[in-house]
Amino acid sequence: MLLSVPRRRDEETGEYELSYTDETILQLLRGTRLSTSEVAEELDCHRTTAHARLVELENKGDVISSKAGNTFIWEIT
């Protein structure tokens, strides 16, 4: 499944870059476990945006998720 990930355009180079980089998200999760909503709140983005980025990181093997009720809990692998 291909997910749409927000990208921001660099005004100087004209190139697009991820709005929420892997490094930013991994640093946020370092040493803790957070729900999708908590990640979204920390990144100041919509929950679906956070979920899409977390799923990408999970597909790359950088994070894992577990289900707690109706929410996902994320942590670094």
Image (cartoon, grey):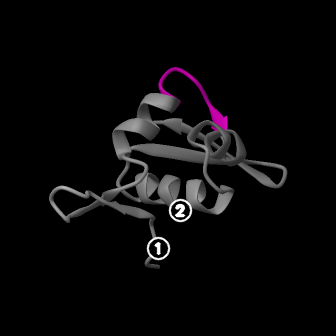
Magenta-colored stretch includes residue 2: no
Q: Residues within 10 Å of mark 1 (few under 14, many from 20)?
A: few
| Left or right: 47 in relation to 58 | right
Nearest to the observer: residue 67 or residue 14? 14
Secondary structure of residue under mark 2: helix
Residue 38 percent coordinates (x, y) = 69, 39
Residue extending furthest top? 31
Q: Residue at x 37, y 47 (%)?
A: 21
Question: Residue 4 shows which numbered tag?
Answer: 1
Q: Residue at x 52, y 20 (%)?
A: 31
- Please report contact status of discs 1 and 2: CB closer than 8 Å, yes or no: yes
Residue 34 percent coordinates (x, y) = 65, 35
> In whole angstroms, how far apart are the C-alphas of marks 1 and 2?
7 Å
Q: Residue at x 45, y 53 (%)?
A: 58
Majority SS type along the magenta span: loop
Q: Residue at x 26, y 57 (%)?
A: 10
Nearest to the observer: residue 2 or residue 66? 2
Which quadrant would residue 7 be assigned to in this image?
bottom left
Nearest to the observer: residue 40 or residue 8? 8
Numbered range of the magenta stretch = 29-34
Residue beneath disc 2: 52
Secondary structure of residue under mark 1: loop
User: With respect to residue 69, does 49 lie above or below?
Assistant: below
Residue 77 percent coordinates (x, y) = 44, 36
Nearest to the observer: residue 22 or residue 7? 7
